[in-house]
Image: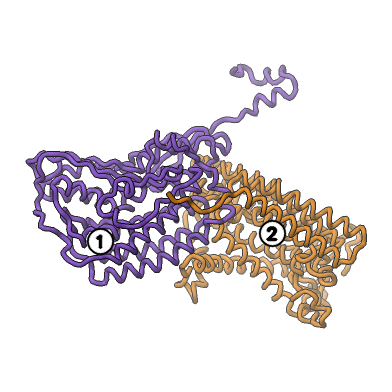
């Protein structure tokens, strides 16, 4: 009831009650992002807080929307290559992996064969990208939980991998390196040696990563039991990748529907047991090691020969559609392409991006938790806003 | 030492070689020597804090596969003065939503108490410079707990007057944190006071020389005091009040220029202060190593005591910095649990054990041994219980 006449009301009320009535707690609305340091780019969430508790989360996305899919359809001169340029700029941490998905779709649409060597190089680059991306997660997750040092260790390793990418594709972030039927050009001569060097560095670094925070008492208490999502709920939300596997479901596109030549490699799919933030962290740590196993095998078996088949530069695939999905660093990434059979550019480009779906679990994880937990839970999703907003 | 007849407090013991005009009190008991000492110590502390900021950045660099400051002066040693000059020349913004009166004065209320507390620290022994402490008055222990608490008021003023929700959240956290961690500190200090039979910091140091350092006699108290003061300073892993990844700097968020710099100077000065207090209360003050007098090396502490004291301070400072770059941050409820459910009960155990053993008159050795064993047992039990709660660490493989 509204207080019509406060002084009178206070006098009339029995002692104690008047004070209680004036000491109501009020919910506070806090705007977190898009410039907040731990929203991983330009994500914005409006938190309704009751003290330190989060009562409601309202997500706002789209600050980085550039129309990547639509832009990919308008490549009159660049043809089917243009979509790859904009695709690189969506998930800028899974570049080689996403290029792989896109180029597989193009090859499926135009029915183009790929030389062995190109296949192997794609696998090596893809898995190194996964390692590089999980390093980024490791650093950012550490920073979200308040530890500053993991970021530096993760970036030291990332630096090695990005330098290799620069040597291979000419660019550190956006390689635009895959072509229908193979690769733009062959890798440098010392490629295999450099990969072997990186494998050695990785082995050392992964142990350091673990030693830094994996068993840390504070880190455990911050992440364990936080943001638990059950298996059923995860499937309902359409989660994929580490978010889904942390709930105990061994769902990995590389194993379920082996694409490219993933069926030739020996690797395991780690799963979680509780589906909390710590499981997601631990799972990615294990995936780092599994990716390394694949790289080791691929570089051991790397054949010689050409890196591109004899596909035409300007593609004009027959009328039809193709959908290809792969496992990128964040989950199940799908590319849907439609060709009208007349133009040299795709008629329709559509991406199924894992972050966008994974991000929907934020409300499940953050509501009822503390502010600090909301930040860690968001970090455990490992979002890339470029890909959510597209 | 001469005693003030009206208050009963001990006045400064001047060195015998000092001329009379320096030591004659002229203004409510303050002598010229006092003023000189105040100026010298404050200047020294300011410089020490600048050096400490540089050291922290160096430690950070070397922990984090970097090098830290390199280019201003040898190994970047002049980086802190350069930063201060930069901050002094920056514009000081006051947000229009802020309280125009409270906002500008809050940094001073954070800054001044820390520097006031330095006045009671016994820097060295009597031999050369008199007692190198400005006011060796008998309530030093109470003073050193009471004065830094004023900092909390300053932080709340800063957070509330900023007109920013993040800084308000930060100041709410500061209040909760300061109130919770004052208690374990006081309870831990009860043990120290009982061991020395005095509240004077000088006497506490002297008593450690005859009896052994408090870090061995009061290991539990030492751990509690060290952790609780770390929390009071809002250092990682207890830095929830400024938590950059959550509330983006808390009370400091709207500050700029030297006002912002004041907060950081105060924070680093607090690190130095609390290291100095820990060294005084638990690490034997200016004594070079335990039992130096028994070995006939008392002169070492008598003449070079200041150096040994500063060495201990520096050692503790580096440990605090090291922790900052290795540990994640606790959540607010975990922070409160840690104070109320662990530090405070263990502090009372320490207090009761010390009291009981002292009353029953065991040898000092037994006091130390008993408290040490009890402390280790408690810590081990707590650790094992917590470990059992945690499940295995490896992920399953499908």
Does dot 1 land on a helix, a strand or a loop? helix
Location of residue A344 (image quadrant):
top left
* Residue marked by disc 1: A121
Pick the front one: B242 or A379? A379
Q: What residue is rendered at 50% in x and 40% in y?
A: A228
Placement of A78 over or under A18, stated as above or below:
below
What tint does the image give chain B?
Answer: orange
* Residue marked by disc 2: B226
Q: Position of residue B391 (x, y in %)?
A: 57, 49
Placement of A257 over or under A132, stated as above or below:
above
Q: Is residue B26 visible?
A: no
Q: Which subunit holds the residue at mark 1?
A: A
- Image position of B113 (left or right of A387): right
Q: Position of residue A268 (x, y in %)?
A: 39, 53
Q: Is residue B269 visible?
A: yes
From the rendered image, report the letter of the chain displayed in purple: A
- Image position of B234 (left or right of A209): right
Placement of B131 over or under B99, stated as above or below:
below
- Image position of B32 (left or right of A167): right
Q: Position of residue A40 (x, y in %)?
A: 41, 48
Q: What residue is rendered at 45% in x and 72% in y?
A: B71
């Amino acid at each position: 009831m509204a207080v019509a006449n406060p002084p009178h009301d206070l006098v009339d009320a029995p002692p104690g009650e008047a004070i209680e009535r004036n000491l109501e707690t009020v919910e506070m609305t806090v705007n977190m992002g898009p410039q907040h340091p731990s929203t991983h780019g330009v994500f914005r969430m409006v938190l309704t807080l009751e003290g330190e508790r989060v009562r409601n989360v309202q997500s706002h996305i789209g600050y980085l929307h550039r129309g990547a899919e639509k832009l990919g359809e308008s490549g009159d001169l660049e043809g089917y290559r243009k979509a790859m340029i904009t695709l690189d700029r969506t998930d800028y941490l899974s570049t080689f992996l996403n290029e792989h998905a896109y180029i597989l779709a193009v090859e499926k649409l135009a029915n183009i064969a790929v030389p062995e060597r190109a296949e192997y190089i794609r696998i090596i680059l893809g898995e190194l990208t996964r390692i590089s991306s999980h390093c980024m997660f490791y650093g950012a997750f550490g920073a979200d939980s308040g530890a500053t040092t993991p970021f530096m260790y993760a970036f030291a390793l990332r630096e090695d991998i990005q330098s290799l990418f620069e040597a291979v594709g000419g660019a550190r972030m956006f390689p635009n390196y895959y072509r229908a039927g193979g690769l733009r050009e062959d890798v440098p001569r010392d490629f295999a040696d450099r990969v072997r060097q990186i494998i050695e560095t990785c082995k050392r670094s992964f142990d350091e990563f673990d030693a830094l925070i994996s068993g840390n008492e504070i880190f455990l208490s911050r992440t364990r039991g936080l943001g638990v999502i059950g298996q059923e709920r995860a499937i309902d939300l359409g989660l994929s990748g580490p978010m889904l596997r942390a709930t105990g479901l061994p769902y990995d596109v590389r194993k379920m529907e082996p694409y490219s030549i993933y069926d030739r490699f020996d690797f395991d799919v780690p799963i979680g047991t509780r589906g909390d933030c710590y499981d997601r962290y631990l799972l990615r740590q294990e995936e780092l090691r599994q990716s390394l196993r694949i790289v080791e095998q691929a570089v051991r078996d790397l054949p010689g020969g050409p890196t591109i088949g004899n596909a035409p530069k300007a593609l004009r695939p027959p009328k039809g559609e193709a959908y290809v999905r792969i496992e990128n660093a964040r989950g199940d990434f799908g590319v849907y392409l439609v060709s009208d059979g007349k133009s040299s550019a795709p008629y329709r480009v559509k991406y199924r991006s894992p972050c966008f779906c994974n991000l929907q679990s934020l409300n499940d994880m953050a509501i009822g938790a503390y502010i600090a937990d909301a930040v860690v839970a968001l970090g455990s999703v490992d979002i890339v806003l470029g890909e959510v907003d597209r | 030492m001469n005693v003030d007849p009206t208050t009963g407090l001990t006045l400064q013991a001047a060195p015998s070689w000092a001329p009379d005009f320096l030591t004659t009190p002229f203004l409510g008991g303050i002598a010229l020597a006092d003023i000189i000492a105040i100026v010298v110590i404050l200047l020294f502390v300011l410089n020490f804090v600048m050096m400490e900021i540089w050291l922290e950045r160096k430690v950070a660099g070397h922990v984090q596969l970097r090098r830290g400051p390199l280019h201003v002066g040898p190994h970047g040693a002049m980086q802190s003065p350069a930063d201060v000059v930069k901050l002094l020349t920056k514009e000081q913004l006051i947000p229009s939503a802020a309280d125009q009166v409270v906002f500008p004065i809050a940094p001073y209320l954070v800054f001044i108490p820390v520097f006031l507390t330095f006045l009671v620290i016994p820097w060295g022994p009597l031999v050369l410079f008199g007692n190198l402490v400005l006011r060796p008055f008998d309530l030093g222990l109470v003073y050193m707990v009471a004065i830094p608490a004023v900092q909390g008021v300053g932080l709340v003023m800063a957070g509330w007057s900023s007109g920013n929700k993040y800084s308000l959240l930060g100041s709410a956290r500061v209040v909760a944190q300061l109130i919770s961690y004052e208690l374990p500190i006081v309870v831990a200090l009860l043990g120290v006071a009982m061991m020395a039979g005095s509240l004077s910091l000088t006497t506490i140091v002297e008593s450690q020389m005859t009896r052994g350092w408090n870090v061995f006699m009061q290991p539990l108290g030492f751990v509690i005091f060290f952790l609780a003061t770390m929390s009071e300073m809002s250092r990682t892993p207890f830095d929830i009040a400024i938590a950059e990844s959550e509330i983006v700097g808390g009370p400091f968020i709207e500050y700029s220029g030297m006002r912002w710099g004041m907060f950081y100077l105060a924070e680093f000065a607090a690190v130095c202060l609390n290291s100095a207090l820990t060294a005084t209360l638990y690490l034997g003050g200016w004594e070079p190593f335990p039992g130096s007098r028994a070995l006939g090396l008392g002169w070492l502490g008598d003449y070079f005591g200041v150096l040994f004291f500063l060495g201990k301070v520096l050692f503790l400072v580096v440990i605090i910095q090291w922790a900052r770059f290795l540990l994640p941050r606790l959540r607010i409820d975990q922070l409160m649990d840690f104070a109320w459910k662990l530090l405070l009960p263990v502090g009372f155990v320490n207090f009761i054990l010390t009291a009981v053993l002292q009353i029953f008159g065991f040898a000092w050795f037994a006091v130390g041994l008993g408290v040490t064993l009890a402390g280790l047992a408690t810590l081990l039990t707590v650790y094992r219980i917590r470990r059992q709660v945690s499940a295995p660490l490896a992920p399953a493989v499908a």
